[in-house]
């Protein structure tokens, strides 16, 4: 069958001004309100996301501070195997890259690069675009054309996008780990969408510890799977993943061979019902083109629970392999071996009575040494909130609890893998409850959340700047005064309380400064600010952060104020050719 596919993004042009950024800086800091025209090397002097994305070079790390960025992350340059370009959430931050206006006609991708290779992305939330994460389309189907590869995506969320969450085209060596994809694919104009898509991907491709749920394909009603290995993606590996509630299959293969699929959990996908058109019964696993997709596969230790509802979900596995298939549990209907698969927080951990799964897995090639470790509270049963111009489907039951994720300290806190031992259990979780990652952070935020420390001068400089008020959470005691920097004077004003939030701790003056004057003293926190995040220290030229946020188990938190620079976007449309 012919598939018409479009992908693209807007390449960012600096319309209002050119930001002067340091060449080959080790670290960059960006914020939604960043306006620096020089520097960007401290939290108190952040630049815009587009400025850093256009200038960061091999070996650089760009730290995204908390807040909502109403612009794309379009990477202009390329890294190397030894020196990738990294874009990651700052410590304790939950940066959100969100489109409020993206439409089917714009075909904009939230995180994108036309040419960049060896790119790493960590801790980002992307929503409201046509595609969440995507590389360049090479322009062919069933071809040997190669695009930009060697990407690593970790601890990221991509949801409420019109087409796909995570898409990798025509290139090699893609890694997606400990991430969530949901509520993608409601576009009725551009189809062939799924939660995670590998298309003509070559080399070593790994999808591990990923949750893909309630994705769809609302134009053609053919794809809409949690995961798809498509059109000659050979040798891909899937470990410890969970897919539930998707319109299509949990996992679908098309014209691809050598797939490893081990210790995954599939539950009640195939939600198209009578809408399913190609195939009419996608089931949980669907092996298209059996002569190819069944070659050299390794499907082991998976639990596969179909709905059993005709027509789309009446059969759990379509075209099951006769070799390379071992220690898998396949059934339809209820799943009494999961803790709460349909609960307030969908929990796929194994109950003690799950004797068909506990200790019933096989060992050998591909079996992971740890489990997914997903905190069920990162997902919640409620009508999902959508972003951009992306609509929801009435059958969707779950949402990503971004408030909870933010309060925990970022997406990475949703995953805390447990070590497997002995004979493996079947499914993405080992037996026993998940050890939830603690909601603690060791690095404060600068420029409006927590003050960063200034450098103490080498010659009678002033001390480091004090910390501001910590992000809101449980009430705590006021922060202590900062200590003096080298030859400097200690800041003496403790952070004040925010309403309902704990006060920040003033940073110690650093002694690494090389300029005569270090950072100035931070102003006290404003007790009338309801978020307790109104102050921040001014950083010295070489200062690092000398603050510590309080442990936050509550959901009270604040995002940095939204702001847009005068940047223009140049629309770039790319058309995916028909594929058989």
Image (cartoon, rainbow, N blue to C red):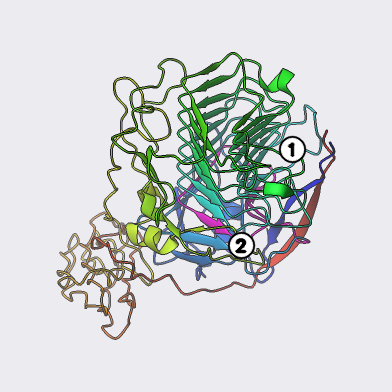
Q: Position of residue 488 (x, y in %)?
A: 19, 66
Q: Secondary structure at mark 1?
A: loop
Q: Is residue 126 left or right of residue 287?
A: left
Residue found at x 70% / y 50%: 217
In the image, 555 versus 526, the foreground residue is: 555
The region drawn magenta spans 105-132
Residue 549's place in the image compared with 62, above or below, is: below
Q: Is residue 177 left or right of residue 53?
A: left
Q: Measure the C-alpha gap from mark 1 to mark 2.
A: 22 Å
Q: Position of residue 187 (x, y in %)?
A: 72, 57
Q: Is label 1 in contact with label 2 (beta carbons under 8 Å)?
A: no
In the image, 457 versus 292, the foreground residue is: 292
Residue found at x 58% / y 67%: 70
Q: Which mark is residue 196?
A: none
Disc 1: which residue: 279
Disc 2: which residue: 394
Q: Is residue 392 left or right of residue 511?
A: right
The tag earlier along the polypeptide, 1 or 2, is 1
Q: Residues within 10 Å of mark 2 (few under 14, many from 20)?
A: few
Q: Is residue 76 visible?
A: no
Magenta span includes 118: yes
Q: Is residue 347 visible?
A: yes
Residue 560 sits in quarter? bottom left
Quadrant location, the N terminus: top right
Q: Position of residue 6 (x, y in %)?
A: 78, 49
Quadrant location, the C terminus: top right
Residue 476's place in the image compared with 337, above or below, is: below
């Amino acid at each position: 069958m012919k598939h018409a596919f479009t992908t693209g993004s807007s390449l960012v042009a600096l319309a209002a001004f050119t930001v002067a950024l340091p060449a080959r800086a080790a670290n960059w800091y960006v914020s939604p309100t960043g306006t620096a025209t020089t520097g960007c090397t401290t939290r108190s002097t952040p630049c815009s996301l587009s400025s850093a994305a256009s200038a960061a070079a091999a070996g650089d790390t760009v730290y995204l501070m908390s807040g909502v960025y109403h612009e794309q992350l379009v990477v202009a340059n390329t890294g190397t195997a030894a020196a990738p370009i990294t874009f990651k959430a700052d410590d304790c931050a939950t940066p959100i890259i969100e489109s409020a206006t993206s439409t089917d006609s714009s075909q904009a991708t939230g995180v994108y690069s036309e040419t960049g290779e060896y790119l790493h992305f960590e801790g980002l939330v992307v929503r409201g675009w046509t595609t969440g994460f995507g590389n360049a389309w090479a322009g062919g189907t069933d071809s040997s054309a190669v695009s930009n590869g060697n990407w690593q995506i970790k601890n990221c969320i991509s949801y409420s996008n019109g087409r796909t969450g995570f898409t990798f085209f025509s290139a090699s060596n893609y890694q997606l780990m400990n991430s969530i994809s949901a509520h993608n694919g409601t576009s009725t104009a551009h189809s062939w969408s799924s939660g995670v898509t590998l298309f003509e991907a070559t080399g070593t491709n790994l999808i591990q510890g990923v949750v893909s749920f309630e994705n769809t394909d609302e134009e053609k009603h053919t794809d809409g799977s949690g995961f798809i290995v498509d059109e000659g993606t050979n040798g891909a590996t899937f470990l410890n993943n969970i897919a539930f509630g998707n319109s299509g299959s949990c996992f679908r293969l098309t014209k691809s061979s050598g797939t490893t699929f081990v210790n995954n959990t599939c539950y009640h996908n195939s939600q198209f019902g009578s809408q399913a058109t190609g195939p009419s019964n996608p089931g949980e696993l669907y092996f298209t083109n059996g002569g190819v997709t069944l070659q050299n596969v390794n499907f082991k230790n998976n639990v596969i629970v179909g709905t059993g509802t005709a027509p789309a979900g009446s059969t759990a596995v379509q075209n099951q392999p006769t070799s390379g298939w071992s220690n898998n549990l396949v059934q339809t209907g209820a799943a009494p071996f999961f803790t709460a698969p349909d609960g307030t927080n969908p929990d796929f951990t194994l109950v003690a009575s799950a004797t068909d799964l506990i200790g019933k897995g096989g060992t050998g090639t591909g079996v992971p040494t740890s489990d997914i470790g997903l905190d069920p509270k990162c997902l919640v049963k409620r009508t999902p909130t959508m972003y951009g111009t992306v609509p929801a489907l009435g059958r969707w039951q779950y949402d990503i609890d971004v408030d909870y994720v933010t309060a925990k300290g970022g997406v990475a806190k949703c995953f805390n893998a447990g070590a497997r031992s002995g004979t493996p259990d079947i499914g993405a979780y080992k037996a026993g409850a998940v050890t939830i990652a603690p909601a603690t952070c060791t690095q404060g935020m600068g420029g409006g959340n927590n003050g960063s420390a200034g450098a103490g001068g080498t010659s009678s400089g002033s001390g480091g700047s004090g910390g501001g008020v910590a992000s809101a959470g449980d009430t705590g005691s006021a922060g202590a005064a900062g200590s003096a920097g080298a030859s400097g004077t200690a800041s003496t004003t403790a952070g004040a309380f925010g309403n309902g939030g704990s006060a920040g701790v003033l940073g110690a003056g650093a002694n690494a400064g090389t300029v005569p004057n270090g950072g100035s003293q931070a102003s006290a926190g404003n007790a009338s600010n309801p978020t307790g995040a109104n102050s921040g220290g001014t950083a010295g030229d070489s200062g690092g952060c000398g603050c510590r946020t309080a442990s936050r188990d509550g959901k009270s938190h604040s995002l940095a104020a939204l702001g847009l620079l005068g940047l223009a976007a140049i629309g770039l449309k790319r058309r995916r050719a028909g594929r058989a």
